[in-house]
Amino acid sequence: MSGIDRNIVLLFTTRTLRLLGYPDERSAAAGITGIARSIGASLSPVVAGALFTLFLSGPFIVAGGLKIIYDLILFRSFKAANVADEV
C-alpha cells in the first residue's frame, strides 16, 4: 500500500472515530487499521485455498458477500450518526 493510500485509510478511520465520539485518536486509528490489515493478509490465503478446493469461484462469492455485509453495517452505523455539529 502506498503512502497516499495509507493516508486516505488513516484519514477515514480518524474521521470515523470522531463521529463515534473519540476525538483526536490518530495513533489508535493507525493501530486499528494496521492490525486489521495484517490479520486479513495472513488469513485470507488459507481461507481462499480451502474455498478453491471446494469450487473455483468460491473465494469470489464469499468476498462479494462479505463486502455487501460490510457496506450494510457501515451504512447502518453512519445513518445513526449525528454530524450536524461537525462542519
Image: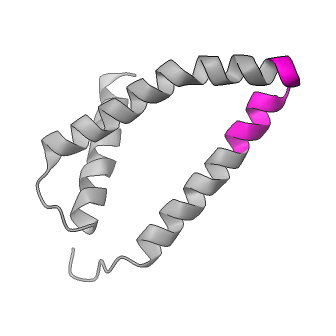
Location of the N terminus by quadrant is top left
Against 29, is 5 above or below? above
Give the vertical position of 3 relative to 15 (above or below): above
Horizontal and vertical percent position of residue 15: 26, 57
Image coordinates of residue 36 in percent, x first then y, are 39, 35
Farthest residue in the left direction? 24
Colour style of the rendered protein structure: one colour
- Residue 56 visible in the shown view: no
Looking at the picture, does residue 64 appear above or below residue 18?
above
Question: In the picture provided, is 50 more to the left or to the right than 56?
Answer: left
Magenta range is: 53-64
Q: Residue at x 21, y 62 (%)?
A: 18
Magenta residues, dominant SS class: helix
Whether residue 75 is visible here, answered yes or no, is yes
The image shows residue 58 at horizontal and vertical percentages of 81, 30
Q: Nearer the viewer, residue 44 or 30?
A: 44
Give the image location of residue 65, x and y in percent. 71, 47
**Relative to residue 39, is residue 86 drawn left or right?**
left
* Residue at figure coordinates x 27%, y 66% from the top left: 20
Which quarter of the image is occupied by the C terminus? Answer: bottom left
Tell which residue pokes out farthest to the right in this image.
55
Q: Is residue 17 magenta?
A: no
Q: Is residue 15 left or right of residue 70?
A: left
What residue sits 21% from the left and 81% below the top? 85
